[in-house]
Every structure is written in structure tokens, then in C-alpha cells.
Image (cartoon, rainbow, N blue to C red):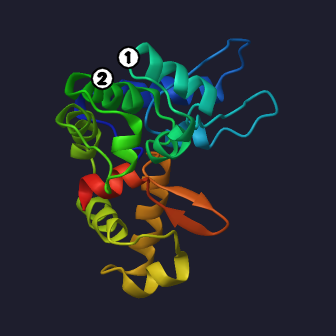
Amino acid sequence: MAGHYQPKSEDYRSLFKQIKERSHQSCFILMGWEYRREIAQIKHPNTHNLILRGLDTASAHQIIAQQGLEPEANGSRFIDYYQGNPLWLKTVANFMVELGLTVSEVLANQPFLLPQDLQDILQQPLAYLSEPEKQLLSLLAKEDEAIALVKLLEIAPMPSADLLNTLQSLSRRCWLEKTDRLYRMSPVLRQYLG
């Protein structure tokens, strides 16, 4: 689950704990796929947590153009599908350029492209997931819409306490988004796991 360290990375727990507990005037920036438990527990007025979302449409169009793909007016659906993730957009745009595809051609097809390079990018962090996390992601991959906690409690093949811990872990790992009491998985992940 999120917050557990690989055997060779246990020293990071101590580092994060010292940052949390000691008085200092340092500036600390931590970037990663996972929202660490020790960081989540810091409640201080000078501490700010920011979860990055995808690029805005203009910036995403710029990434696409840098790969040699002609941005199109109707490309916002394409950008939304890949959640404005710069690496995902760059990878898919490069793949499209290599094959001579346009955004319009990709938009005409469902599901969207999931090139091997993008699958390789997704595979590495997914390999670190626990079995309950993998089970829950597989379950959510079958859902087309965001799903309420009440429904998840009904359909999940695990006790409710385990489900809640698994939801928290997947949220901290940024594999799920929670909005208005609904849980959602990105379309790219849903396609990859589906």
C-alpha cells in the first residue's frame, strides 16, 4: 500500500519524519507519483501540498506541436483523454507522427491510442501496487463513469475496512481522483487495465 517503502528506501521515512518534526527554515519540494504518508500528516500553516493536474489546453497543444504533430482545433478531447499529462501526450504524439496519423483520425477511433511506449511507462508504477489495489483498479476499469463509495462498498470483493484503506492508498498514489464523493480512474488507465 502507499506509504510502505522498498527495503533499500527505508531511510526516506526517517528523512521525511525529521522534516516534519524538526524546526527549520528549509524549503523542501517533493515530487513523485505517490503522496507520502509522512507528508500527508504534516499540518502546518507554512506547509503547502499541491497535486499537479494536467496541462492547460494551450500548453498541451505546444507539447504536441513540439513533437511535430499539427495541433487541431478539436484536439481538446484528445488532450482531455490523456489528462493533459505531458509525458503521455509527448509519447502518443511521437507515435502518431511516426505513423503519419492526425488528431482527427485518432479522435474518430475509440478507444484512443495506447502505444507500447505508453504501456511501458504505465507498467512500472503499476508493478508496485498491492494485490488489493490491483483488484480494485481492475474493478474500476470496468466502470465507464465515476463511482460512488456506496456502490463500491456493494460490489468490491473485500471487507469495507480494506476497501477504504485501498482507496486511500490508490488516491495517494494518484491512480484515482475523488470529486464530489465519486471515484474516477483516468480513461488511459481504464483502457490499459481493461
Residue 33's image quarter?
top left
Q: Residue at x 29, y 39 (%)?
A: 125
Name the residue type under label 1. Answer: Gln
- Ranked by sequence position, the earlier of labels 2 and 1 is 1
Classify the position of the C terminus by image quarter: bottom left
Decide if residue 43 is on the left or right side of residue 96. right
Query: In the drawing, what numbered circle is on residue 39?
Result: none
Q: Please tell me whether residue 55 is drawn above or below residue 152 in the rendered image.
A: above
Which residue of the protein is positioned furthest toward the bottom in this rendering?
Answer: 154
Residue drawn where x is 51% and y is 68% of the image: 146
**Residue 135 percent location from the top left of the image:** 27, 67
The residue beneath circle 1 is 67
CB-based contact (under 8 Å), mark 2 and mark 1? yes
Residue 188 falls left or right of residue 43: left
**Circle 2 SS class:** helix
In this view, 139 is above or below 99: below
List x then y, in percent, for residue 106.
Answer: 34, 43
The reply, left or right, for residue 45 in relation to residue 65 is right
Residue 51 percent across, percent down from the top left: 60, 37
Q: Amino acid at mark 2?
A: Asn
| Cα distance between the residues tagged 2 and 1 | 6 Å
- Tell me the residue at 62%/43% (across/down): 41
Judging depth in this view, the residue of 135 and 161 nearest the camera is 135
Residue 56: % across, % down: 63, 32
Residue drawn at x 73%, y 30% is 47
Residue in the foreground of this view, choosing between 187 and 149: 187
